[in-house]
């Protein structure tokens, strides 16, 4: 669990110092039933609101969050440990960018698809809302992951019930404040603090029409089991073991800086963090030297200090799990190159963990096969595109991967062969709201963002009108 739990309540424990940040009761069965009933009633009314007005309400809610980004960022730091220098940016950058983009394209994305219109027939396809959407969001990027579903679902005319991770429950509560300030009709957005068993029962409830889940592979399987007896869709974003391929013709300094940032930002706790790096043999040693020098400059410490650039992972148990992966790799011959002694806060038994760069690694090590979710980057030399493609695809995951090169034609050609939902050239660890966010293999199924992401929360209805008889 991300937070300490009692029989009918939970506590959110800060990774900063072990203090209790939030204490909340779990919802009762009656409260869950009431929320679902309110959502069904509100959705029917909300679906009748013109799309342009829905977009205006969502935009006002985004405005509210941006206006309060400082306070919301500080809350986020206390709940999950991201440095305060970075936390507000989740709202003012990614959250805002995605929400505004989706609101801006809603009218076009939800407009009628005209098939034929003449004196005899009018044929069209109309996108209609699904009903009540249950959003299950994680703690690592709670604003970014939730906005991918919450805003598009509301834009499409659905009601939304948000279940946020027990590690970041205040995010759900702030959403409610934002939508209330924006004038969203009561009941169209609600949140529930519920445990795993209650989540399963809620998914099984016939009033829920769609489930959007972001989390672990095991969590995705649990969602699927809960929905197994119902004909409803589920959107599953389940993480990754993302790779970067640095070609011999890469813009070297730029590649080093961005690949290292892609590995260690948010203490590596990102579904699309760069965990596997494959570097052309001709520049491998130079790349490793530069990456280690950059990693040694990170400041590990209390995330409330603006000078801190690397905060703790979410809890001590998570740090120990990451350390076990690293130690297993070292025992199998891997070399750890970052000087741990430079990071005084890094102590076993705590969530504080220095960045790790491993070389002399192989794909039979867990650190290259299992999702790490910590500040660890592995680097392997490759002899060219063929070997890089083979190694990138040698993974159970397929969320994103990147190539660092000055040859755009080569980037496209390589990308066609890569088994991921997103392929980058000269960037990583970023979501463009105009593009579909999707994964393959154990990274999940379905998509969010882009026009396709809005359509995910609708069903097509065909209209076949015979005008002459």
Image (spheres, grey):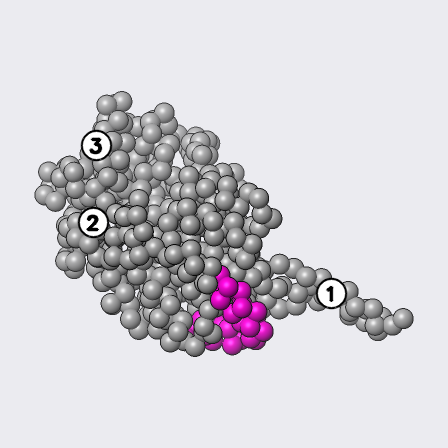
* Quadrant of the snapshot with the C terminus: bottom right
Judge whether residue 54 is colored magenta. yes
Q: Position of residue 353 (x, y in %)?
A: 19, 42
**Which of marks 2 and 1 precedes in the sequence?**
2
Which residue in the rendered view is the most extreme toward the front? 30
* Quadrant of the snapshot with the N terminus: top left
Toward the viewer: 194 or 309? 194
- Residue 336: which disc? 3
Residue holding disc 1: 463
Q: Is residue 274 at all visible to an observer of this figure?
A: yes
Count neighbours of disc 3 (C-alpha within 10 A) and say few if under 14, some if 14 to 19, many if 20 or more.
many
Residue at image point 56% right, 50% down: 233
Q: Main secondary structure of the magenta part?
A: helix
Is residue 307 toward the left or the right of residue 170 in the image?
left
Q: Which residues are magenta?
A: 36-60
**Disc nearest the viewer among 1 and 3:** 1
Q: Quarter of the image holding residue 135?
A: bottom left
Q: Position of residue 65 (x, y in %)?
A: 34, 69
Which residue in the rendered view is the most extreme toward the right? 469
């Amino acid at each position: 669990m991300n937070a300490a739990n009692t029989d009918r309540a939970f506590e959110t424990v800060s990774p900063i110092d072990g203090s209790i940040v939030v204490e909340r009761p779990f919802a009762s069965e009656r409260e869950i039933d009431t929320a679902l009933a309110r959502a069904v009633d509100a959705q029917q009314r909300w679906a009748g609101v013109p799309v342009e007005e829905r977009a205006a309400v969502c935009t006002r809610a985004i405005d509210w969050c941006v206006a309060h980004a400082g306070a919301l960022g500080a809350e986020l730091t206390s709940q999950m440990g991201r440095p305060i220098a970075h936390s507000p940016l989740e709202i003012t950058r990614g959250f805002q960018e995605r929400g505004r983009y989706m609101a801006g394209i809603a009218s076009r994305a939800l407009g009628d698809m005209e098939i034929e219109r003449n004196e005899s027939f009018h044929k069209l396809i109309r996108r209609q809302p699904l009903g009540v959407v249950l959003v299950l969001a994680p703690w690592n990027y709670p604003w970014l992951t939730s906005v991918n579903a919450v805003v598009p679902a509301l834009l499409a005319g659905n009601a939304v019930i948000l279940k946020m991770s027990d590690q970041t429950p205040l995010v759900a509560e702030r959403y409610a404040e934002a939508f209330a300030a924006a004038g969203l009709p009561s009941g169209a957005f609600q949140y529930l603090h519920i445990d795993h068993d209650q989540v399963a029962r809620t998914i099984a409830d016939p009033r829920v029409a769609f489930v959007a889940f972001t989390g672990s592979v095991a969590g995705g399987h649990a969602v699927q089991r809960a929905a197994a007896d119902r004909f409803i869709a589920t959107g599953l974003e389940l993480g990754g073991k993302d790779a970067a391929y640095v070609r011999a013709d890469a813009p070297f300094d730029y590649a080093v800086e961005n690949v290292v940032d892609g590995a260690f930002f948010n203490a590596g706790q990102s579904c699309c963090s760069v965990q596997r790096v494959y570097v052309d043999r001709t520049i491998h040693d130079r790349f490793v030297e530069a990456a280690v020098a950059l990693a040694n400059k990170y400041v590990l410490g209390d995330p409330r200090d603006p000078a801190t650039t690397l905060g703790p992972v979410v809890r001590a148990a998570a740090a120990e799990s990451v350390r076990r992966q690293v130690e297993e790799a070292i025992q199998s011959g891997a070399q750890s190159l970052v000087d741990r002694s430079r990071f005084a806060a890094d102590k076993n038994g705590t969530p504080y963990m220095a960045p790790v760069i491993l070389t002399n690694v192989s794909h039979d090590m867990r650190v290259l096969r299992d999702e790490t979710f910590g500040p660890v980057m592995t680097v392997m030399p490759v002899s060219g595109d063929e070997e890089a493609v083979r190694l990138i695809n040698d993974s159970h995951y397929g969320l994103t991967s990147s190539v660092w090169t000055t040859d755009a034609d080569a980037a496209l050609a390589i990308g066609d062969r890569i088994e991921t939902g997103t392929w980058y050239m000269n960037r990583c660890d970023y979501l463009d709201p105009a593009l579909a966010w999707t994964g393959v293999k154990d990274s999940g199924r379905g998509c969010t963002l882009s026009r396709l992401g809005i359509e995910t929360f609708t069903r097509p209805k065909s209209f076949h009108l015979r005008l002459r008889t």
